[in-house]
Image: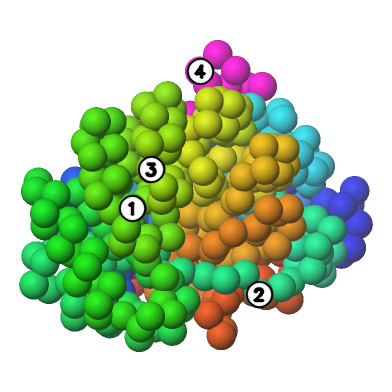
Amino acid sequence: MNAQAALHVRDVVVHPVVVPLQWPIRTASGTMTGAPLLLIDLRTVEGVIGRAYLFGYQELTLKPLADLVLAMGGMIANDPLAPVELNRKLRRRFTLLGARSLIGMALSGLDMAAWDALGEATGRPLVSLLGGAPRPVRAYLGHGVGVIPVSEVPEAAATLAAEGLPAIKIRLGRDAFADDLAAVRAARQSIPAHVMLMADFNQSLTVAEAIRRGRALDDEGLCWIEEPVRADDFRGCARVAAALATPVQIGENFSGAFEMHEALRCDASDLVMIDAQQIGGVTGWLAAAALAQTYGVEVSSHLFHEVSAHLLAVSPLCGWLEYTNVADPVLAEPLRPVGGAVSAPSRPGIGIAWDDKAIQKWRAP
């Protein structure tokens, strides 16, 4: 099968799972020890299957996400496999409701699965379909040193640095800033000098407190300070970015390129981080990457390193790839870093395949 015109959507099948995390995610708002994932199979009449997954953050999201994805799959049944056209059709159906939150995630998941099916049908990796070629993208370990007692930070940081990537993340947002500062310094002293350190506040600060803490961290050699304030407070974040010497990074919660444009228009950050399931899948990412180029802002990825390795390779201002192996337990061939970087695989499409036994083992009730 090698002709897009010969393919038509048959239906969609989903597999809700909750898989264990190799490194629990501990933020200022709580701890996550398992990853609720919705695995998506977009099946064509001609027998080609496109795959993608969504990360629901909380298990309670899996059922509504599954219902949305299945309902949307019914809306495009028998349509030609043309990802941009399928995306356009579905978004028109949700004009009045809007394409945010779970609806936006479902749209993104189907978009990624459609592009994967197109790659499978043509025998080409996604990056090649988009006019690029696989290449190494520098990666950092996104799970990060959590909001843990400062005394535990050195061991945690050293363990993550031993994974061999050129940068790791530390999560901040403790009640006392002195503890955050001590954690950053403890991490820095516990990892090799060549390993870079990013800090993530996970939206835990007010604007005034973000400026106070950010200025105090300016001399700590951080690569960036991520999401210091509420994700949708672009003007507040712009005040923070203007006040700090350390670059400010936001974007994992951009709900589409239009929202990203608003952030860029008001100089909300120095850098942007795109999340494939929030931005609109492959189609949404391409629009966002072009927009970032227009503003001269470097693009990094959030989660979903399997598809992000393809998309960063064709992004004009490519920054860092966040390596977070949340889906590894249910993947037949997990994508691994090599030499501190991640390259898109040469397999067709996104290059993912499910481990059917693992799906049965971790299937959500």
Name the image quarter holding the C terminus: bottom left
Which residues are the magenta region?
92-101
Callout 2 amino acid: Pro
Q: Is 32 placed left or right of 244 in the picture?
A: left
Tell me which label, 3 or 1, sits earlier in the chain.
Answer: 1
Q: Nearer the viewer, residue 280 or 227?
A: 227
Q: Are marks 3 and 1 in contact (CB under 8 Å)?
A: yes
Q: Is residue 90 visible?
A: yes
Circle nearer the viewer, 2 or 3? 3
> From mark 4 to mark 2, how far is it between C-alphas?
39 Å
- The answer to whether residue 191 is left or right of residue 81 is left
Indicate the quadrant where residue 18 lies: bottom left
Q: What SS does tag 2 mark? A: loop
The N terminus lies in which quarter of the figure?
bottom right
Q: Secondary structure at mark 3?
A: loop
* Residue 27, numbered circle: none
Q: Earlier in the sequence, mark 4 or mark 3?
A: 4
Q: Which residue is mark 2?
A: 136
Which-is-in-front pick, marks 4 and 3? 3
